[in-house]
Amino acid sequence: MSDTFVDNIERGRFELTEGSHLAYATYRIADGQMLIPYVEAASPLRGTGAAGRLLERVAAEARARGLKVVPMCGYASRWFRRNTQHGDLLG
């Protein structure tokens, strides 16, 4: 399955498209931090790990930009707690 990851600046979200289905994480950047208020995956992607694959890429993007991450939604918070290799990104 092919996938596409984009920073949709106009909508303020990172998008991962797998097949014809979308997972996204909304974000705001302020004071050197990337705030993540919401993560959503289309119904066919739920339970497939798509949201986790999305957040892996979001974490890489934050790291490349030199930003700390503030996960505000429950899913993003749990994901960062489970993926301790990204703990240095937490702001």
Image: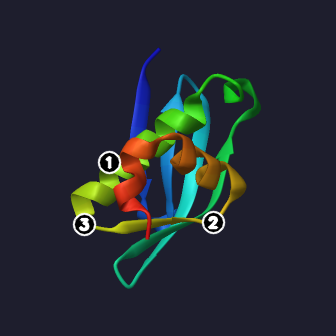
Residues under numbered marks 1 and 3 in contact, where contact means CB atoms less than 8 Å apart: no
Q: Residue at x 57, y 61 (%)?
A: 26
N-terminal of the two: label 3 or label 2?
3
Residue at mark 2: 72
Looking at numbered disc 2 in the image, what kind of residue is underneath it? Met
In this rendering, is residue 29 above or below 60? below
Residue at mark 1: 60
At which x and y percent is residue 56? 42, 40
Residue at mark 3: 66
N-terminal of the two: label 1 or label 3?
1
Count of residue discs: 3
How many C-alpha atoms fall within 10 Å of the one at disc 1: few (<14), some, or many (≥20)? some
At which x and y percent is residue 60? 32, 48
Q: Residue at x 70, y 25 (%)?
A: 47
Q: Is residue 87 visible?
A: yes
In this rendering, is residue 43 above or below 34? above
Looking at numbered disc 1 in the image, what kind of residue is underneath it? Ala
At which x and y percent is residue 32? 34, 78
Helix or strand or loop: what does disc 1 sit on? helix
